[in-house]
């Protein structure tokens, strides 16, 4: 699979098989992540790969905390400004995915929120960290690195799903895994073999046309 094919095939998978993923494969994928460009080659990314009992423990901890607090996260934050065009795209995304999921589940919102904290049942969760004190300055570098990981995984026949929601629980994750207070969790990456027989994995939200996000001059 070449890069364009991996870009086209990639999506956020929501159903994973329980088949284990070989450690050498994970190493290859993370090596691809490490090939990303970064400011002055400082390579500010740090990965924590979690499987098995620890993975289950963390997922359970997040889920029970979510359920206990009956949290309905306002992911956007009340006081933040968002351009209307982006809010419209978000609305369309939720309308479309809820249509898809309501055929399979009673409560799509529950499925998405709790599914995120179940790591969509992927056998591996990879937490991506950066030193808190440089986080703002180097987020672009982390994004480039994570995209390499995601595309490398796709090209190896694996699937991923990025999770921002897990950041809410990063203090507990750091405590459990003995990670320094100075680290900031940027994102979680669910990793595993996607179950392509499950129709939930067919869901591919569309994208804006080029003319909505590109301006041309002199060409
Ligand atoms: C930084 C980031 C955080 C995300 N966090 C979550 C999350 O917490 N839960 C979730 O279900 N999906 C999450 N997603 C997945 C997006 O909803 C998904 O990428 C988007 O809808 C586009 O769909 P696609 O990846 O299938 O193309 C996240 C994606 C990104 C890039």
Image (cartoon, rainbow, N blue to C red):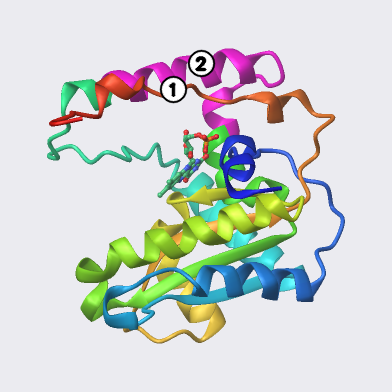
Q: In this image, 103 relative to 173: left or right?
A: right
Task: Answer with the quarter of the image where residue 142 lies.
Answer: bottom left
| SS label for mark 2 | helix
Instruction: Give the class, few, some or many, for how many residues have Cα within 10 Å of label 1's Cα (few <14, many ≥20).
Output: some
Which secondary structure class fits the magenta region best? helix
Q: Which residue is mark 2?
A: 96
Q: Which residue is mark 1?
A: 93
Q: In this image, 189 relative to 172: left or right?
A: right
Image x and y of residue 145, in percent: 45, 65
Image x and y of residue 102, in percent: 63, 15
Contact (Cβ within 8 Å) of mark 1 with mark 2: yes
For residue 176, above or below residue 60: below
| SS label for mark 1 | helix
Name the residue: 22% across, 21% down: 85
Please state, as top left, top right, bottom left or bottom right, where the C terminus lies in the image.
top left
Magenta part of the chain: 88-111
Is residue 118 visible to the viewer in this orientation of the structure? Answer: no
Beta carbon at label 1 within 8 Å of ligand 1: yes
Image x and y of residue 134, in percent: 23, 77
């Amino acid at each position: 699979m070449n890069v364009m094919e991996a870009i086209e095939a990639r999506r956020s998978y929501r159903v994973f098989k329980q088949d284990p993923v070989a450690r050498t494969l994970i190493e290859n994928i993370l090596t691809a992540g490490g090939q990303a460009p970064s400011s002055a080659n400082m390579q500010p990314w740090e990965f924590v790969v979690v499987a098995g009992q620890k993975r289950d423990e963390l997922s359970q901890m997040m889920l029970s905390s979510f359920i206990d607090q009956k949290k309905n996260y306002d992911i956007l934050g009340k006081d933040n400004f968002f351009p209307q065009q982006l809010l419209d795209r978000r609305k369309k995304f939720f309308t479309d995915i809820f249509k898809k999921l309501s055929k399979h589940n009673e409560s799509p919102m529950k499925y998405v929120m709790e599914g995120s904290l179940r790591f969509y049942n992927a056998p591996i969760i990879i937490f991506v960290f950066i030193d808190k004190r440089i986080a703002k300055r180097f987020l672009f570098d982390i994004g480039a690195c994570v995209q390499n990981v995601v595309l490398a995984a796709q090209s190896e026949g694996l699937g991923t799903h990025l999770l921002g929601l897990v950041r809410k629980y990063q203090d507990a994750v750091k405590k459990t895994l003995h990670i320094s207070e100075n680290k900031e969790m940027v994102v979680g990456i669910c990793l595993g073999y996607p179950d392509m027989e499950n129709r939930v994995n067919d869901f591919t939200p569309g994208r804006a046309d080029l003319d909505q996000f590109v301006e041309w001059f002199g060409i």
